[in-house]
Image (tube, rainbow, N blue to C red):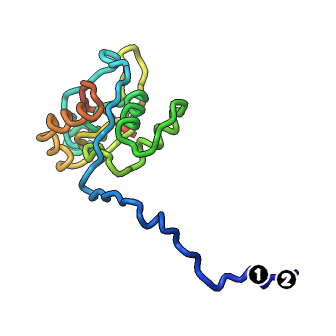
């Protein structure tokens, strides 16, 4: 078989059309794309679960000097699966298909992407007591925690951060102190 006609001594020539395509401005890391306008009916889950408001105090794992044990807790806002889907349709650069299952949306929500609001830096798997009995285990946006004194000091700005999270998710769910996994 003669292979002399398959030689590639000359580089391919660029098409003149590709040089005339206008370029888009690249966004800075600080600049976020505007969120999409989304309309989605979601159940408020109001009065479904307890919302513990009392700060548990700094975490303590030993009974020294008569102190009680204080388990790790987070001051957080629980999120339902429809809340997560709403958020992804509003902010995610990747299209979320209509038939996406829970695990797809869960993975996409936990993935950091450009344009993700800075208020959602810390997400935790919460243990939320339900009024009818049992435990609900949603993801939640963490506002503060009791692991360190610095974490408890974040409570000084908690109202402002809760308001921003309410704007992002377009709901009015209350934050509370929950154990987390």
Q: Nearer the viewer, residue 72 or 162?
A: 162
Element type where label 1 sits in the image: helix
Q: Which residue is mark 2?
A: 2
- Give the tally of numbered discs: 2
Q: Which mark is residue 67?
A: none
Answer whether residue 61 is visible to the viewer in this image. Answer: no
Q: Residue at x 24, y 55 (%)?
A: 30
Residue pushed farthest left?
156
Element type where label 2 sits in the image: loop
* x and y, in percent, of residue 52 in the image: 25, 26
* x and y, in percent, of residue 47 in the image: 30, 15
Left or right: 74 in relation to 95: left
Q: Residue at x 47, y 64 (%)?
A: 18
Dot 2 and dot 1 residues touching (CB under 8 Å): yes
Q: Nearer the viewer, residue 107 or 155?
A: 107
Q: Quadrant of residue 129?
A: top left
Q: Nearer the viewer, residue 115 or 55?
A: 115
Q: Residues within 10 Å of mark 1 (few under 14, many from 20)?
A: few
Q: Nearer the viewer, residue 104 or 180?
A: 104
Up the image or down, 56 lies above or below 148; here it is above
Q: Which residue is mark 1?
A: 5
Q: Quadrant of residue 139?
A: top left
From the image, which quarter does the C terminus lie in? Answer: top left
């Amino acid at each position: 078989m003669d292979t002399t006609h398959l030689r590639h001594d000359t580089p391919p020539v660029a098409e003149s059309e590709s040089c005339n395509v206008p370029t888009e401005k690249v966004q800075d890391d600080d600049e976020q794309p505007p969120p999409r306008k989304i309309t989605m009916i979601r159940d408020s889950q109001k009065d479904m679960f307890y919302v513990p408001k009392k700060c548990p105090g700094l975490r303590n794992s030993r009974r020294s000097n008569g102190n009680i044990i204080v388990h790790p807790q987070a001051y957080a806002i629980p999120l339902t699966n429809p809340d997560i889907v709403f958020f992804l349709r509003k902010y995610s650069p990747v299209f979320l298909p209509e038939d996406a299952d829970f695990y797809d949306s869960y993975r996409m929500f936990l993935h950091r992407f450009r344009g993700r609001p800075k208020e959602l830096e810390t997400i935790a798997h919460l243990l939320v007591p339900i009024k009818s009995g049992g435990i609900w285990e949603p993801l939640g946006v963490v506002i503060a925690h009791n692991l360190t004194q610095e974490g408890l000091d974040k409570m000084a700005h908690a109202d402002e951060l809760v308001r921003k999270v309410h704007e992002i998710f377009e709901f009015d769910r209350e934050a509370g102190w929950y154990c987390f996994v």
